[in-house]
Image: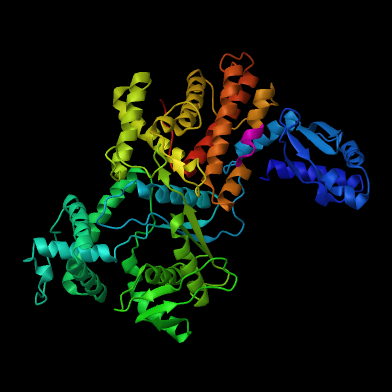
Amino acid sequence: MKKLLDLITEEVAKAFEAAGYNTSYARVSISNRPDLCEYQCNGAMAAKKEYKKAPIMIAQDIVAQMTDSSMFEEVAAVNPGFINIKLSGAYAAQYMTEMEADENLSVEKAAEPKTIMIDYGGPNVAKPLHVGHLRSAIIGESIKRMGRFMGHKVIGDVHLGDWGLQMGLIITELQERQPSLPYFDEAFSGPYPEEAPFTIGELEEIYPAASGKSKVDEAYKEKALEATHQLQLGRPGYMALWKHIMTVSVADLKRNYQKLNVDFDLWKAESDAQPYIPELVQLMKDKGLAHEDQGALIVDVKQESDAKEVPPLLLLKSDGSSLYATTDLATIVERMKLFNPDEIIYVVDKRQEMHFVQVFRAARMAGLVKEETGLRFLGFGTMNGKDGKPFKTRDGGVMRLENLIKDINDEMFKKIVENRSVRDTEATKTAEMVGLSAIKYGDLSNQASKDYVFDVDRFTSFEGNTGPYILYTMVRIKSILARYTEGGGVLENGKILAPANGVEKDLMLKCARFNAVMENAFDEKAPHKICSYIYELSNDFNRFYHETKILSEENEVQKASWIALLDLVRRVLEACIDVLGFEAPERM
């Protein structure tokens, strides 16, 4: 379906043409003065210069051509040249009826679907997920879902960190603790044990212990660096240990991401890019892009137009070891070879922007991607506590993500039980659903690039701009629909009548904006725009609900119309929260 605003603009353009004015001035926007009108066109003022005529006179000429249109309830020319428009209630109802019958709820799918890869998540293996991993997972998952809703092929990749110094640190610490393990015996010919010599809990203790030692013991750090290098060279015992680390870690990561309703199509890691590195390095050399500097191999990526210093990209260290930049470039090679995406989006902390400037420039200089392939860095801000500093536990430590989720779920369980609206057997599951909405909506309702304060008290509130408020609204709608069917009514795509009052019309017009909001939110990779929309739509519904006796309406045709409208609002809200990555319970 066409967007309602486009249909209105087309009708206004006919009036411009009939009045003898250029239709390029006929653009219509949502009114910034809803007390005066619903839509407005300011084209008459823009046309003043071309036609050497007072804008109010141009506006009056155009309005004269619009008065007979069945699309409009009221049009007026207002000084100094605004054209104020109110849509016909019958036309709004017709749009709602067509929208209800459309399986895509009026959203036009992409005419030329793209293959888009999203790199999000990015945890290091052998470490627990903490609150610092929250934003990448939540934002990336939402953008993936938006893209799919718009008809694109979107591939989500977790891109695990499994090939850096943390591997060498774990291997070194494990060797100190259990030197007799066969993995450290170079003469051992295998096979290596199938069971890992550690649990996830032990692994999560080993890494921070090793990291702490490396900061005070230079010899220990050198040993870890050498272990990292040997792993990257493919030493069999170290490779076997690495496989154990991956198996144990990935199982735990999947369990925790599942709690966030975050799902990756690919569980690829830095190590998957290793086979592409030798060819990548040779290509950089052959093209004259890479050169030695103090034994290391670097690529100059600065440009004359740079307003600030852009350092060279470090491709290989002096000992031949690869770095994050090497791996990221090799991963681009792998992605282009396996998936040939039209665009690759990186959902990463905004403090990593310079790294991706270097990587993207090197990739284009070397021709690793096609000229038309998009490489986009989507940097996000920091999640802070009420003190304005990065979110911590009460004792000042980094909070594990599963502990944050548990705290939120416990708070929601307490509120739901106090409300006594859900049976005890359902309360835990309902608390998890509402708790996830509190976390995800609390994050996504903020512009991704901005820092924000994670306020547990506010995010778990059933009032205000929160996930629980959105779900409460949806549950209210579901309750009305259930009571209607229990009374013998049938939910079906029926005719929606012209609005009976102003609040119903407001609800219709807000609902009609769904296709434009979804398209714009995906184009700008801005989930917060969907949050703003469903908050406004929920408010409009609740005003309509409080002013309209829906189920007690005696006119069955009118009641059926209202029920059809409510069902449409429910479907729109469900589509939106699904894109945001959470769902609504039946009761709260």
Residue 505: x percent and y percent? 68, 27
Residue at the spot 43% in from the left edge and 68% down from the top edge: 335
Residue drawn 51% across the image and 22% down it: 480
State which quadrant residue 85 falls in.
Answer: top right
Which residue is farthest left? 180
- The answer to whether residue 40 is left or right of residue 460 is right
* Residue 512 lies in the magenta stretch: yes
| Residue nearer the viewer, 102 or 333 | 333
Residue 532: image x %, image y %?
A: 56, 38
Q: What segment carries the magenta color? A: 509-514
**Against 265, is 257 above or below?**
above
Q: Is residue 554 above or below residue 458?
A: above
**Quadrant assignment for the C terminus:** top left
| 309 lies left or right of 266 | right
**Along the viewing direction, whichever of 299 and 186 lies nearer the viewer:** 299
Q: Main secondary structure of the magenta part?
A: helix
Q: Is residue 369 above or below residue 376?
A: below
List x then y, in percent, for residue 240: 18, 67
